[in-house]
Image: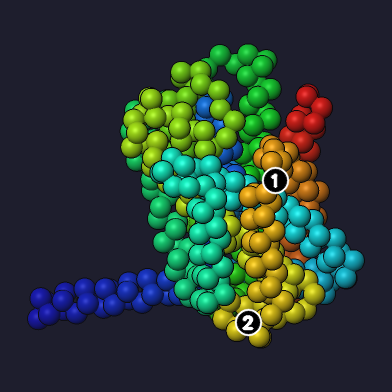
Amino acid sequence: MEKQFLANRNKSFLSSLWKRVLLLLSVFGPATITAMADNDAGGVATYSIAGAKLGYPILFLLPIITILLAITQEMGMRLTIITRRGLADLIRERYGVRASVFMFGTLFFANLGTLVTELSAVKTTSGMFGLPPIPSVIVVVIIAFVLITRGNYKMTQSIMLVACVFFLVYIFSAVKAGPDWNLALTNLIYPHGVDFTPSYIKDYLIIGMGVLGTTITPWGQFFISSFAYDKKIEKGKVILSQLETYWGAFLTDFFSFFMIVATAATLFVNHIVLDSGERAALAIAPFAGKIASQLFALGILNAGFMGLVIVSLSTAYAFAEFFGLSGSLDDSFKESKTFYVLYISQLMIATLFVLITNVSLFQVALVTQIINAIALPLVFYFLINLTSDRELMGSFVNHPFQKNFAIVSSVVIVVASIFTVAAVLFGL
């Protein structure tokens, strides 16, 4: 009897556990994909430069950035699940057409600059694998085109989740670099191990703010809201979605940790100057070996593809919501024509820009950062106000801690963006 009782209890426990796992899987996707997409080609470049120029002490910022990312994206996720509306849709309804036009305009041009960066990374890095640059760019764009226009929400989510797995290459690359793990881990708690000269502190502030800005973006706030809406997550599963949001925030900076470690252990200790993520893949080869270099390059290619799809989608989603149009990955081309046309148009414009022009990528990144600096405070203003509205959110309104933390976070992000742009423009 006792054995039968234990067997039944174990069976009941396993059954209950399995049901919980299935519930979690039913909401899994939007938050993880959004957070991981922040580690796009531009993000990899920023983290690589940070590790190469500043070494292990820059790791101190990662736990802080992770908390900021988790708090802000949780608000966007919760807003959509409770209201059954996207962030852009609610901005249009509550703040009018002028606000919608301005927000979409800034988002469109900033995202276009980001897409150019993604494709440029593909163009440069493909050569490391003996692939012709221009055909490689065209093939990646065609894949991104077919994925969205011929697929559906479930297929897109599945492929993007598979793309997330490829970020594991940064762990292997970091391990091959032979870092000082004790120094790396302790720098998560407090920055140390270098000579903190005035010049180093200045670089730390500027690059550190760039690391913050590349992780928390305007497009990320709109995408997590729209993608969660497209998934049709039920209100009763909001807690599970919140848990996934926190998991996604942790995961993105978990991999960022290894990107920084790989370059800090090879380039910083050997005083190698770096100005892009693609160059990082080449530069670490003499110190960590060809395999580590190729793994790093593979990660950049994957990040470029993922960023290309997600950032393009964020623009298309936002346009549909801002102007009250249909826009869903489960709709046919005829049902959401504008949504798909805008997605395709962005890919074409970015591709032509990369293949035809010789404009400095530094200039593109700078303009993109300036536009983001303008848009980000407004995005958070709308997000905080909407999630603090009891009439709109009911019992799921922000707690005082959430609201205050988000406000402080917003101020930090705004100051960081402004200071970084000013430092680059005026050489502060």
In the image, what residue occupies the spot 56% across and 60% down?
141
Is residue 105 visible in the rendered structure shown here?
yes
Disc number placed over residue 85 in the picture, else none: none
Q: Secondary structure at mark 2?
A: loop
Q: Nearer the viewer, residue 366 or 414?
A: 366
Q: Nearer the viewer, residue 171 or 342?
A: 342
87 on left or right of 38? right
The reply to whether dot 2 and dot 1 touch (C-beta < 8 Å) is no
Q: Position of residue 73 (x, y in %)?
A: 62, 58
Q: Residues within 10 Å of mark 1 (few under 14, many from 20)?
A: few
Q: Position of residue 137 (x, y in %)?
A: 54, 53
Which callout, 2 or 1, points at the residue further toward the start of the chain?
2
In the image, what residue occupies the spot 52% across and 30% down?
51
Looking at the rendered image, the quarter that the C terminus falls into is top right
Q: CA distance from mark 2 to mark 1?
A: 31 Å
In the image, what residue occupies the spot 34% across and 40% down?
172
In the image, what residue occupies the spot 69% across and 73% down?
341
Type of the residue with mark 2? Phe
- From the viewer's perspective, is residue 229 above or below residue 385? below
Type of the residue with mark 1? Thr
Q: Position of residue 403 (x, y in %)?
A: 71, 56
Q: Secondary structure at mark 1?
A: loop
Q: Nearer the viewer, residue 254 or 313?
A: 313
Q: Position of residue 200 (x, y in %)?
A: 63, 19
- Nearer to us: label 2 or label 1: 1
Disc number placed over residue 357 in the picture, else none: 1
Dividing the picture into quadrants, the one containing residue 35 is bottom right
**Residue beneath label 2, please?**
333
Q: Nearer the viewer, residue 244 or 124?
A: 124
193 on left or right of 94? left
Is residue 414 visible in the rendered structure shown here?
no
Dividing the picture into quadrants, the one containing residue 313 is bottom right
